[in-house]
Amino acid sequence: MTVDEARAAIVKTLQKVQDTSGLPCPVLAGGDVPRRVLEQFDSTVWPVATSWIAKELGMTIDNDVHVFGGKNGGPMLTINQSAELICAHFANYAFSVAAE
């Protein structure tokens, strides 16, 4: 999986989340922080968005992977940073599946 594929899945999912919620969605760029640019996009929505991203990419994202950041008060992630995180997680996921 490439960063571009992960980024595309994130953007598609964020648009779907906003559409499903009946909220507007601006044109999203890699440097955007979803929590800052999307109405009502907060930690109550993130688990659903994360599962939709995983489904879009055909993988599993563990519950302890905070795709949008903010873990333990840490910084929120940009879309690009989230895509990189997913790719790193995918590398570990692919390795563990191959090892089984």
Image (cartoon, rainbow, N blue to C red):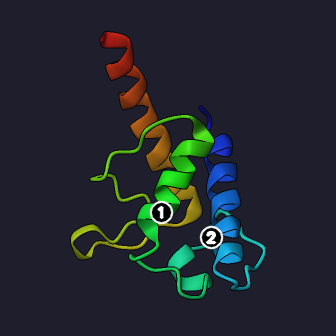
**Image height of 23 relative to 13, above or below:** below
Numbered disc 1: secondary structure: helix
The location of residue 57, given as percent across then percent down, is 59, 39
Q: Are marks 1 and 2 in contact (CB under 8 Å)?
A: yes
Q: CA distance from mark 1 to mark 2?
A: 9 Å
**Image height of 67 relative to 44, above or below:** above
Residue 77 in sight here? yes
Q: Which mark is drawn over residue 48?
A: 1
**Image height of 61 relative to 20, above or below:** above
Label 1 neighbourhood size at 10 Å, few (<14), some (14-19), many (20+)?
few
| Quarter of the image where one finds residue 100 | top left
Residue in the foreground of this view, choosing between 60 and 11? 60
* Position of the N terminus by quadrant: top right
Q: Amino acid at mark 1?
A: Val
Q: Amino acid at mark 2?
A: Val
The location of residue 68, given as percent across then percent down, is 44, 65
Q: Which mark is drawn over residue 17?
A: 2
Numbered disc 2: secondary structure: helix
